[in-house]
Amino acid sequence: QQQVKQSPQSLIVQKGGISIINCAYENTAFDYFPWYQQFPGKGPALLIAIRPDVSEKKEGRFTISFNKSAKQFSLHIMDSQPGDSATYFCAANSGGYQKVTFGTGTKLQVIP
Amino acid sequence: EPEVTQTPSHQVTQMGQEVILRCVPISNHLYFYWYRQILGQKVEFLVSFYNNEISEKSEIFDDQFSVERPDGSNFTLKIRSTKLEDSAMYFCASSENRAVNTEAFFGQGTRLTVV
């Protein structure tokens, strides 16, 4: 019940295209849904996050869509760039303490 | 920009040996965490630490693991008797407070290889 399921495992997108990564959860106690970006040799870094009382959040080229009833959320990267090539983790947590439950990760490659 | 720093970047140890992984959290942060990432797998929570005691721990964090804040700046993870399956990237993180939407900042990780 603590799991966060993420797909796809890997994704190749052409420069300028839209990258879409999907996640689903079961635990209704989760109340915060961050996305992390991880470059090789680096730790995860917070990219964007959403609370479940909001259906969409946009920051620049990055948008989270959230469907509370379906317990699903997704990350859209518009106008994908080669510099976006990284591993993306969706995540969820609840009740503070930053015990973040991570998804399995999506390795994104944006090709010129 | 303040950052979480971890040392060493790579540690190789023999099975059964004790290892200590070190972290210097961001200076005004009060909450500290360890996560691990087995190669190619997801990042997993190990433990959170506040006010010199463990706040929460996962089932992974058994008696072989311990954490300590030995002074005002360092935060350490000790593995008493390493096993092959402890080989992973270990990430330290810190946050200002425990609010759910407070960002936790991650260090660059220590790659532990148990041989």
Image (cartoon, coloured by chain):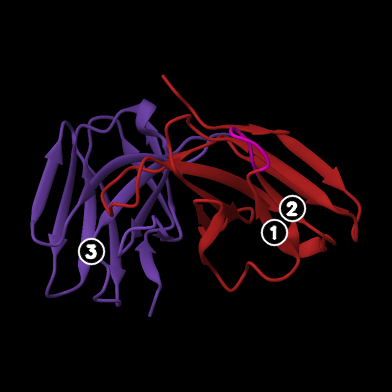
Chain colours: A purple, B red
- Per the picture, the main secondary structure of the magenta-coloured stretch is loop
Chain ID of residue with mark 2: B
Q: Are marks 1 and 2 in contact (CB under 8 Å)?
A: yes
Question: What's the distance in space between the residues labelled 3 and 2, CA to CA?
Answer: 31 Å
Q: CA distance from mark 3 to mark 1?
A: 29 Å
> At x 29% / y 51%, what residue is drawn?
A34
The picture places residue B11, in percent across and down from the top left corner, at: 79, 40
Q: Secondary structure at mark 1?
A: strand
Q: What residue would you read off at disc 2?
A: B78
Which region shows up in magenta? Answer: B70-75
B72 magenta-colored: yes
In the image: residue A77, left or right of residue B30: left
Say which residue label 3 marks. A31
- Same chain for the residues under marks 3 and 2 in the image: no
Q: What residue appears at the point 41 percent right and 19 percent down from the top-left corner?
A: B1
- In the image, residue B92 lies at what x, y percent? 56, 44
